[in-house]
Image: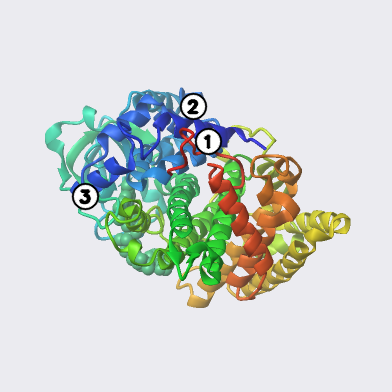
Amino acid sequence: MDHAPYLLAEQLERDLGDPEGPGVVFSHANSLALDETEEFPAAICRRLEELGVHEYYVPAQYGGRLETYEQVLQLIRTVARRDLTVAIGHGKTYLGGVCVWVAGSPEQATALGADIKAGLPVSLGLTERAHGSDLLAGEVQGVPTEDGGWLVSGEKWLINNATRGSLLSLLTRTDPAAGPRAFSVLLVDKRAIPQESYRHLPKIHTHGIRGADISGIAFTEAPVAGSAVVGEAGSGIEIVLKALQLTRTMCAALSLGAADHALAIVLDFVEERELYGRKLVELPQARHLLAGAAADVLLDEALALTASRGVHTLTEELSVTAAVTKYLVPTGTEGVIADLTKLLGARAFLKDVHARGMFQKVDRDHRIVGLFDGNTLVNLSSLVSQFRSLVRGYRRGTGGLDGAGAAYDLARPLPPLAPERLSLVARYGSGVIASLPGSVEALRAEADANPAYKPALAHAERLVAAVARVHEAMEAHQNALTDVPPEAFDVARSYALCFAAAAALGIWRHNHRAAEQGRTAGLWQDGLWLRATLARVLGRLGEPTDDREAAEALLEQVRAVRGEGLLPSLLPLALKHNDEGTSC
Ligand SMILES: Cc1cc2nc3c(=O)[nH]c(=O)nc-3n(C[C@H](O)[C@H](O)[C@H](O)COP(=O)(O)OP(=O)(O)OC[C@H]3O[C@@H](n4cnc5c(N)ncnc54)[C@H](O)[C@@H]3O)c2cc1C
């Protein structure tokens, strides 16, 4: 089963060239050299622009090529698979523009689209040195002027592309009164304000994504025109929280790319490394770790597919989907990298010995994904704050069931995003969770006809019971809005796992017939990937499930897929650049 966003990514992969090949701009060698010298990957970003990647940061109605968030997911995943520094440094422009796509006027959005298409970087200025995640404490201030504009003063710190960016979506306190209505988002165009009214802060040295432009910007009575306000003055916090639902969903692309890269490095290593007269891949413990890592990546992929399509079809529930995705995919990938580190052994610690020492860079670079754009605890806390409506929806069986079906069914065309449907709370619960009984019923019907599905069905039935228990536990914390207790965070973690498993079942249910015919058919045969991922989820929920048969079969399929030059993923994506082999 070929799927258009994967084919788009496959084309980008081909156009970028073999990352181990000579004369390739976006090569592993260049990425490592830039990392050593902490230099921004400017030439690589120019190459991405030659290929039009930045045009996918602009919605089609504003002159760009972004039609579905699935496209962005697969393109950024492809870039991140080579180098997270580039994905974060270049993809930042999408984050910079997103407030305007959510709430800007058509004229503002069209003008910004033209600037982005012309190659101007855009950044997002939320964070302040003293306040971190506490956006309501922000001190960057806009004092109203007689001509309807603002004089902006104050400092934003830890801002990606603050120095290189030409434009900046700036969360600004435009009303001295306290509360969420005190803030506005201003689209500040550095070209339109006097140079002496702002200064860039020095580059901040980081342990990962070392070449990225992480700096800051300080304004002193910078005159910003009234036309720079995005949406209504006073609605800045709401706009930012809605925009973050989109960016947090897209952070899955960064983690998936990192996981793909780490898995590829280790899959090659275990095939080469011989110990005790056998290949490392033949040792049971190594197989166990590898199969678990592969299953976790496939679970994350199923969740990311659902979430990126859900942007269009489950828009009202994105407050939940984005929080689950931004929590689970980065932390899941951290776990995958930690497990794979154990397999690489000394080579995870050595420079230039295996795969140029690139694994260590992936590990360092990926640590930021769980920290920025709302850290793990912020996302879990956001889930806890929605426990009340999620429990109510679960009990009543409400939630966007049709939207979930449309998100799962990869053959269904997606409608354009309607940003006005974004909401800070999923009022009717979760369509993904509501879809679980139907998916299990479909699996039961399949198992009646083909007993090979019975183990997957047994896992799914245990999941249904676990979901009921998790919702009971959520009920006990549905009033925990401030001072969230640690147990509520644990319940939110379990909820996220249940959500991801329900998404995996939905993706399986709506696509397995077509996918069983495609180039990754082996992963889908008899529900193999679903069975292996459900077993992993049950284990992570504290219900150990020893399905060694599924783990073994999954590992063999993943090895076969990689051997054929494909990405080990749910749907086919060729990585081969020539007949010689696969190097990314
Ligand atoms: C490389 C990099 C790039 C960045 N790029 C940008 C950018 O482009 N634009 C931008 O605006 N910002 C950016 N940031 C800032 C980033 O988003 C912040 O670091 C983030 O918001 C968290 O702030 P903090 O790390 O200062 O942690 P704080 O908010 O001070 O939190 C400290 C700790 O408190 C705990 N905590 C926080 N909130 C909660 C909660 N609700 N419940 C329970 N515990 C909690 C967590 O353990 C957290 O680690 C970037 C940061 C880095 C490192």
Q: Nearer the viewer, residue 506 or 339?
A: 339
> Which residue is disc 2 drawn over?
65
**Residue tagged 3:** 36
Which residue is at a point 67% across and 63% down the rendered structure image?
A: 550
Give 278 or 569, whichever is nearer the viewer.
Answer: 278
Q: CA distance from mark 2 to mark 1?
A: 9 Å
Q: How far apart are the alpha carbons under marks 1 and 3?
A: 31 Å
Ligand 1 quadrant?
A: bottom left
Establish if 419 lies above or below 384. Answer: above
Residue 487 to residue 64: above or below: below
575 up-or-down from 435: above or below: above
Give the quadrant of residue 443: bottom right
Q: Position of residue 319 (x, y in %)?
A: 54, 52
Q: Which residue occupies 61% across, 44% down? A: 310
Circle 1 SS class: helix
Amino acid under disc 3: Glu
Determine contact: label 2, label 1, CB under 8 Å.
Answer: yes
Q: Can you give x and y, in whole percent of width and height, for residue 494 in the image?
A: 58, 68
- How many circles with numbers are drawn on the protein? 3
Q: Position of residue 54 (x, y in %)?
A: 40, 31
Whichever of labels 2 and 3 marks the residue nearer the N terminus, that label is 3
Q: Nearer the viewer, mark 2 or mark 3?
A: 3
Residue 318, given in percent of the width and then of the height, sits at 57, 49
In the rendered structure, which amino acid carries the disc numbered 1? Gln
